[in-house]
Image (cartoon, rainbow, N blue to C red):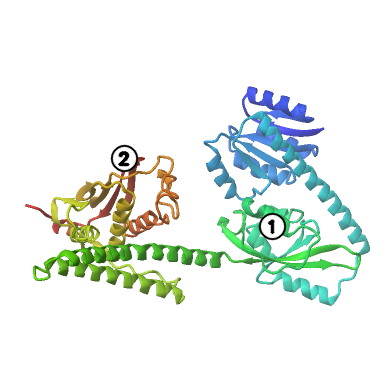
Amino acid sequence: MAKILVLQGTPAFVASLTQECQAQSIAVLPTDDAESALARLTGDTAVDALVIHSTTENPLTLIQQAHTGAPDVAILLVCTAAQYPSLVRALQFTPGIGTDVQCVESTDPAQLVRLIQAAVQRTQTRRRYHTVLAHISQRVAAVKPPISPVSQHLGRLLEHAPIAAVLINDHGFIVGVNRQTTLLLANNTTANAMRLLGSRLDDWFHSQDRETVMQLLQPPLAERTMSPPFMIAPLGRDGKQRFVELLVAPLSNVTGETGALVFLHDVTLQQALERQKEEFLASAAHDLKTPITTLKSMVQVLQRRLRRADMFTKFAWLETMLAQMDASADRLAAQIHRLLEVTRGKMEETLAFERVPVDLVALATEAVGRFNGGQGNDRLKLETNFTKLVGLWDTARLERTLDNLLSNAIKYSPAGGDIILALQDEETPTGAVAVLMVRDNGIGIPAADLPNVFERFSRAYNVIGQIEGTGIGLADVKQAVLDLGGTVAIASQEGAGTTVTIRLPLTAGNVDTMQAAK
């Protein structure tokens, strides 16, 4: 009969868990004392799993000690749903805690007993493996085959190779590693490096990639070209998210034993650069649509007016529209130039950021006029008590921010209605700020989607398949505002419109340039 240690938890929880476990031929050994639990865990080799309740004092320290004393024993940390996110993060970044520690947010005994059964099986499998490995080691030590100079040279070469190399048997268990492997997978710590030997290689990958890696290493092993990038577990180098490509080279010896030498190529930097490139291209494509759409709408208005206008009347309106069209074309040319720089391999360079005096009132007035297109009964309204509101900002970023907000307000207000662009100032504990608000009466954002609206490619369910979009406009707005040292917030109600509020810092010199309208 399998045995598990249960530390802490309410009497009712322990009692119900004991009843469920007994029905599955699992003996429960409850205790409230951490020291006695550790002593029993390290002294009783028949204990197959350790269940720790989150009410235990210093559970992460206890897990570290349990791993040191009994590294083969699987551990379950039981917690509430509210505790789960923080405990998972803590487990990921706590040294000496490996992949056999499972954080469980459910306290339902029926569900928990199924996880306990899996944990017991993992412990028993690891013990059987170590028993077989010890037996094989004894046999190898007795035979003591001579090591050829070629084998010695190959071993030294792999040990000092700049790429991680892992030797696995035909069942995917690790039987040898080089120094780069311990650095990449085990964070170069002795305790974690010892855990590498005898573990499955796929266990060291992120859960989302584990099954795919396991299938790649299924016997019979065959030579494979470089695999797609897989994410390794956060326990690896510096605890950060990293990606590797696998190259499998099958091996066999004269006795017929098979295995493979697996090379792990760290492609984290390439992945990051590729992701930046994809995000930039998506952002550029989105930004290019706005001035093109504006330009096309102006041309259409111009064509309609030319058909019915008296060609000998005033041409002031025509001059204004042509100037707006010219400005839109300039912005389009700048975006194309930015795109060309990226395609020429300048992704690693920081995009230009220049703080210059910018009049937010003038910028907003131009944007409103551009989107209204000089038509009567204009939807966009500018509300402000200032004739001038100057700050040290990046002009291009502010223009893109206004274009994104106003185009979104128009797009997601298909039934019409006024769209208000309001400008004001505000005193905060850190100084004066300029406040920019865009308010519409459109379809709004469902409450469930509101927390994610600033995430790239995130779109609300009530517009997917109904209104065209990419889900990157608000993400760009947030990034631009953060670059300018400001904050952005959004308030919305489905069916009742949306308000986006941006606050940008004003220096003491900026405040002097603000002029209230008479």
For the image shown, how many numbered marks are present on the structure? 2
In terms of sequence position, does the residue under pointer 2 or pointer 1 come before the other?
1
**Residue at numbered disc 2:** 496
The structure residue drawn at horizontal position 45% and vertical position 62%, both measured from the top left corner, is: 279
Q: Return the residue nearer the eye: 217 or 308.
A: 308
The structure residue drawn at horizontal position 74% and vertical position 59%, both measured from the top left corner, is: 217
Residue found at the far right of this picture: 143
Q: Position of residue 333 (x, y in %)?
A: 32, 73
Residue neighbourhood size for the residue with mark 1, other residues' Cα within 10 Å, grouped as few (<14), some (14–19), many (≥20)? many
Q: Position of residue 359 (x, y in %)?
A: 19, 61
Residue neighbourhood size for the residue with mark 2, other residues' Cα within 10 Å, grouped as few (<14), some (14–19), many (≥20)? few
Quadrant showing the N terminus: top right
The answer to whether one can see residue 108 in this image is yes
Give the structural element (helix, strand or loop) at label 2.
Answer: loop
Left or right? Give the position of 175 relative to 208: right
**Residue at numbered disc 1:** 213
Give the structural element (helix, strand or loop) at label 1.
Answer: helix
Type of the residue with mark 2: Ala
Q: Is residue 333 shown above or below 13?
A: below
The structure residue drawn at horizontal position 41% and vertical position 75%, both measured from the top left corner, is: 340
Left or right? Give the position of 290 relative to 232: left
Q: Position of residue 190 (x, y in %)?
A: 68, 56
Type of the residue with mark 1: Val
Cα distance in 3D space between marks 2 and 1 = 48 Å
**Rendering quarter of residue 246:** bottom right
